[in-house]
């Protein structure tokens, strides 16, 4: 069997390391992708630490923000060809047999959460942190021209989520959009909201991010919910960080009939006041990957130069270092591994 280099998590809580492993092949309905870049997501950290599990079995090659070039197509594949530049969609398929799948629901993250046996690239099957990955052809999207692999990689998850969340909130012309947390997802949500033409407000308690938020397109920067309220409030609040306490505080600045979109995974208690929610008819919406329509839009907006991920680039041999920077919250803002 042909071999390849892959970044492997050997066991729960163990550091990432480069190993020589068997290379995959494209089976029927699949494509084989030569990975050029893969982003490190907070989800990768939480899977490694055991805070999240999608049926993962270690040792495991993680990585669900993968982009690269199709180098082989399996039997029956007509939608992709050798040479195509593609991104990998995390949810390859549902099981097709459980009660949820029999409803004929979309292949989005609701299906990922509700299907009994979803196939998730880099979460329960080998992911993009290796030199090659095999995936179902329909679980890829064509990358637009002019978008580099290094910038495309983070958009496969956090960019996808940010744009999906904004669309889920359905902001109307003239409404104001606030982004809570200017980090890996938040710095993209800020840019997407601005690119869509909305007055955009950054909510961050980090003084060193205030000027950066303005550079990224924020019309206004506030430190907390009280300041957001005093500044006139927001019709949409996009929760992008890993702190429920922060978004609960930002609720103070949500306008009547506003929408709060929860996109950042957090593990602390989520508590919001009842009366302001009830009397002001505020909606709380959960949102993640809401369908590949939004992913292709997110990629195209970036290809047009309206959104640019801030990335730190690491060769595959420095993957452990890159992972640790993400785990320690030091990456600004997405760490991307390149594969030779």
Image (cartoon, rainbow, N blue to C red):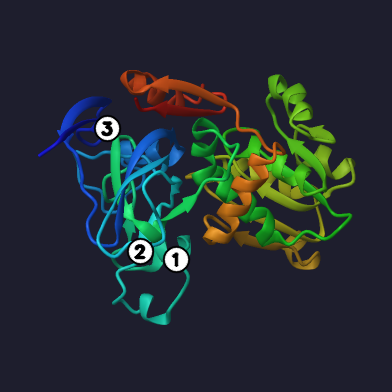
Residues marked 2 and 1 touching at CB (< 8 Å): yes
Measured from the top left, where is residue 188 in percent x and y? 64, 39
Residue 272 horizontal/vertical position (percent): 65, 54
Between the residue at mark 3 and the residue at mark 2, the CA separation in whole angstroms equals: 28 Å
Mark 2 / mark 1, whichever is N-terminal: 2
- Expressed as whole percent of the image width and height from the top left, the position of residue 42 reads 45, 37
Q: Nearer the viewer, residue 272 or 310?
A: 310
Name the secondary structure under disc 2: strand
Where the N terminus falls, by quadrant? top left
Q: Is residue 326 above or below residue 263?
A: above
Residue designated by label 1 = 107
What secondary structure is marked by label 3?
A: loop
Instruction: Give x and y (percent) for residue 47.
Output: 34, 42
Q: Residue shown at 29%/62% (left/top)?
A: 29
Q: At 77% across and 26% down in the image, what residue appears?
A: 215
State the separation of the CA atoms marked 1 and 3.
Answer: 30 Å
Q: CA distance from mark 2 to mark 1?
A: 7 Å
Of the pair 77 and 63, the residue shown nearer to us: 77
Sequence-earlier tag: 3 or 2: 3
Residue labelled with disc 3: 13
Image position of 100 with respect to 272: above or below = below
Pointer 3 with pointer 2, Cβ within 8 A:
no
Q: Is residue 290 left or right of residue 101?
A: right
Instruction: Name the disc covering residue 93, or none.
Output: 2
Single out the mark in the foreground, 1 or 3: 1
Q: Residues within 10 Å of mark 3 (few under 14, many from 20)?
A: few
């Amino acid at each position: 069997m042909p071999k390849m280099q892959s970044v492997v998590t050997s066991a729960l809580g163990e550091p990432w390391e480069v190993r020589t492993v068997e290379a995959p092949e494209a089976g029927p309905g699949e494509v084989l992708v030569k990975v050029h870049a893969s982003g490190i997501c907070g989800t990768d950290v939480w899977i490694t630490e055991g805070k999240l599990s999608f049926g993962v079995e270690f040792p495991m090659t993680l990585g669900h923000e993968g982009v690269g070039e199709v180098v082989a197509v399996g039997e029956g594949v007509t939608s992709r060809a050798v040479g195509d530049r593609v991104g990998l969609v995390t949810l390859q398929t549902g099981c097709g047999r459980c009660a949820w799948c029999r409803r004929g629901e979309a292949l989005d993250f609701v299906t990922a959460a509700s299907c009994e046996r979803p196939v998730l690239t880099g979460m329960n099957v080998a992911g993009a942190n290796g030199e090659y990955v095999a995936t179902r052809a329909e679980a890829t999207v064509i990358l637009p021209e002019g978008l580099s692999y290094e910038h495309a990689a983070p958009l496969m998850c956090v960019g996808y989520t940010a744009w999906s969340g904004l669309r889920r909130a359905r902001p109307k012309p003239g409404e104001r959009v606030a982004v809570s947390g200017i980090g890996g997802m938040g710095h993209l949500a800020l840019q997407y909201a601005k690119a869509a033409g909305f007055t955009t407000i950054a909510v961050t308690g980090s003084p060193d991010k205030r000027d950066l938020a303005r550079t990224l397109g924020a019309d206004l920067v506030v430190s907390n919910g009280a300041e957001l309220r005093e500044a006139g409030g927001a019709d949409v609040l996009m929760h992008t960080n890993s702190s429920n306490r922060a978004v609960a505080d930002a609720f103070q600045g949500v306008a009547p009939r506003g929408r709060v979109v929860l996109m950042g995974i957090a593990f602390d208690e989520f508590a919001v006041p009842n009366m302001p929610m009830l009397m002001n008819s505020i909606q709380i919406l959960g949102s993640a990957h809401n369908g590949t329509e939004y992913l292709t839009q997110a990629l195209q907006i970036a290809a047009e130069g309206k959104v640019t991920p801030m990335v730190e680039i690491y060769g595959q041999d420095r993957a452990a270092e890159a992972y640790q920077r993400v785990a320690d919250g030091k990456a600004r803002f997405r760490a991307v591994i390149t594969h030779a």
